[in-house]
């Protein structure tokens, strides 16, 4: 259907949108290019004032924004409202912190004056996914706009209303026309954008294949890219862990956002001495989750975003079962209309099956037992992905080994993996490169210019 809002809880069309023509897209690019050359000259204080107003709008209208997110992609209303509030946080954080992160950085060379000067690059194309339709955009836009860049948003085709709402928020906040624009285009028009000399850089959050394609296109144009791709994050439980807390957080970590999150834990690895008890508690917790209407406050698992996602996830589960995996709970589509899948736990997984190495995007967990810390680390790293890991141990020596040996962009010890404006976010291996958030993120789309002045 192209660009359309379809309610995943009932399959009904909400609204569809025509794609921009090539001429209309060119007009948007011209507007962004013109806006950048004026906006880059604004002070950080001016940008911060507008960014704080965006935060106020998000806070004041978080319930209505939450309902829009839930209607378009199926996350629970409670989670959607929290997402809008988190977007307000990231706006405020960069409004308050940008001046520090972008300040001239003096370097003592022993003679004259030398320093690093951070300047914006220009229009940045953001290709964003549907799973966190507000957060993914704001975590790019807040630092990029505070650095003096302008944003061009190519949002996922199933959440167009979220993208348009975000554009309106920036407009209402006082950002000049053209500083942030939502582009109603299909994937077929992305290559035209990447190749256009007015686009200075590209950031993409999405699949491996999409990341590889965009990076290849940008590479031909010698353009900076930041990629945040898939994840198959390990959740590790060692004998010294607080088992009750670890299990409770394991259920939450697997099913956050209906399980449709890159940083949702997907592979659960428990050391042999605690495996049996962890399995029992974890399966009971997953089986007890309430699946239902995402607008209902009591619902814990809503529908997957699209019918195709549901079919793909079920196909992965069935392939694993045919290869010998055993289902401890769930394992099939829920018996109700809409894109609902039962919370599922799989054990005895064949590690030679291709699905073992794939990302499971939905409420499906793979559970493993390991003999010692060395085997735990081997299993944890036995994936093409390297986004983040959650490790539960109170042994300092084990903690240090996990910090040093887990192949990931982040290791969280005795806590669930989360994204936080204050912490750099990104992965290694097939999970991508570059960083979002924190001082590292705001500098990704700047020219790190060396200045040296003779005495």
Image (cartoon, helix red, strand yellow):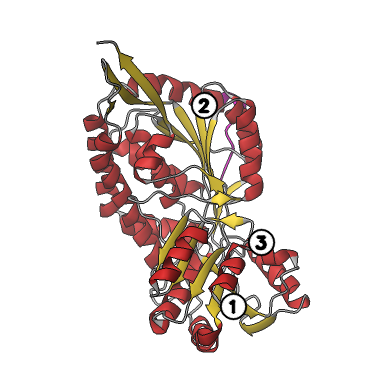
Furthest residue toward right = 322
Quadrant assignment, res 393: bottom left
Q: What residue is drawn where x is 48% and y is 64%? A: 402
Residue 235 lies, with reference to residue 123, above or below; the image says below
Q: Which numbered circle lies on residue 199? A: 2
Residue 208, above or below 300: above
Q: Is residue 125 visible?
A: yes
The numbered mark at residue 90 is none
The quarter of the rendered structure image containing the C terminus is top left
Crowding near pointer 3: few (<14 within 10 Å), some, many (20+)? some
Q: Nearer the viewer, residue 442 or 33?
A: 442
Judged from the image, the secondary structure of the residue bearing numbered disc 1 is strand
The residue that label 3 is drawn on is 358
- Between 164 and 52, which is closer to the camera in this rendering? 52
Residue 387 location in percent, x, y?
52, 56
Q: Which is closer to the viewer, label 2 or label 1?
A: 1
What residue lies at 37% left-to-right and 38% top-to-bottom? 442
Q: Earlier in the sequence, mark 1 or mark 3?
A: 3
Confirm whether the magenta stretch covers residue 186: no
Magenta extent: 16-23
Residue 21 part of the magenta segment: yes
The x, y position of residue 285, in whole percent, is: 48, 83
Element at badge 3? loop
Mark-to-mark CA distance, 2 and 3: 32 Å
Q: Residues within 10 Å of mark 1 (few under 14, many from 20)?
A: many
Considering every residue shown, the one lying at the far top of the view is 454
130 or 171, which is in the foreground?
Answer: 130
User: Is residue 90 found left or right of 33 in the rendered image?
Assistant: left
Mark 2 or mark 3, which has the lower sequence index?
2
Question: What distance separates the C-alpha of mark 1 from that of mark 3?
Answer: 20 Å
Quickly name the residue at label 1.
370
């Amino acid at each position: 259907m192209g660009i359309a809002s379809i309610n995943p809880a009932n399959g009904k069309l909400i609204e569809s949108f025509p794609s921009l023509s090539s001429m209309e897209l060119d007009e948007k690019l011209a507007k962004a290019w013109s806006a950048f050359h004026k906006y880059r000259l604004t002070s950080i204080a001016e940008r911060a004032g507008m960014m704080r107003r965006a935060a106020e709008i998000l806070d004041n209208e978080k319930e209505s924004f939450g309902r829009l997110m839930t209607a378009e992609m199926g996350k629970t209303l409670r989670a959607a409202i929290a997402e809008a509030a988190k977007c307000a946080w990231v706006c405020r954080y960069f409004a308050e912190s940008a001046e520090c992160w972008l300040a001239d950085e003096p370097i003592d060379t022993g003679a004259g004056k030398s320093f690093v000067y951070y300047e914006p690059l220009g229009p940045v194309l953001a290709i964003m996914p549907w799973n966190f339709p507000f957060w993914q955009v704001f975590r790019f836009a807040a630092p990029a706009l505070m650095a003096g860049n302008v944003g061009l948003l190519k949002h996922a085709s199933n959440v167009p209303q979220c993208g348009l709402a975000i554009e309106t928020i920036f407009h209402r906040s006082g950002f000049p026309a053209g500083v942030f624009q939502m582009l109603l285009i299909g994937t077929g028009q992305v290559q035209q954008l990447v190749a256009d000399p007015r686009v200075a850089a590209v950031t993409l959050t999405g699949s491996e294949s999409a990341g590889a394609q965009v990076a290849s296109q940008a590479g031909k144009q010698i353009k900076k890219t930041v990629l945040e791709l898939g994840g198959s994050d390990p959740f590790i439980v060692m004998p010294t862990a607080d088992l009750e807390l670890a299990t409770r957080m394991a259920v939450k970590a697997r099913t956050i956002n209906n399980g449709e999150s890159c940083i949702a834990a997907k592979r659960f690895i428990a050391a042999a001495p605690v495996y049996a008890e962890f399995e029992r508690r974890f399966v009971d917790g997953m089986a007890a989750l309430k699946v239902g209407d995402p607008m209902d406050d009591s619902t814990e698992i809503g529908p997957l975003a699209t019918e195709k996602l549901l079919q793909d996830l079920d196909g992965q589960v069935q392939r694993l079962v045919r290869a010998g995996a055993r289902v401890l709970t769930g394992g099939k589509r829920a018996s109700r209309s809409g894109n609902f899948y039962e919370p599922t736990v799989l054990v005895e997984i064949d590690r030679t099956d291709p699905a073992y190495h794939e990302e499971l995007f939905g409420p499906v967990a793979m559970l493993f037992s390991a003999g010692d810390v060395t085997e735990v680390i081997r299993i944890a790293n036995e994936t093409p992905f390297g986004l983040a890991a959650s490790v539960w141990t109170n042994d300092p020596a084990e903690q240090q080994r996990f910090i040093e040996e887990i192949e990931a962009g982040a290791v969280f010890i005795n806590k669930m993996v989360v994204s936080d404006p204050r912490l750099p976010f990104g992965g290694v291996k097939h999970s991508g490169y570059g960083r979002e958030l924190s001082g590292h993120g705001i500098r990704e789309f700047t020219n790190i210019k060396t200045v040296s002045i003779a005495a």
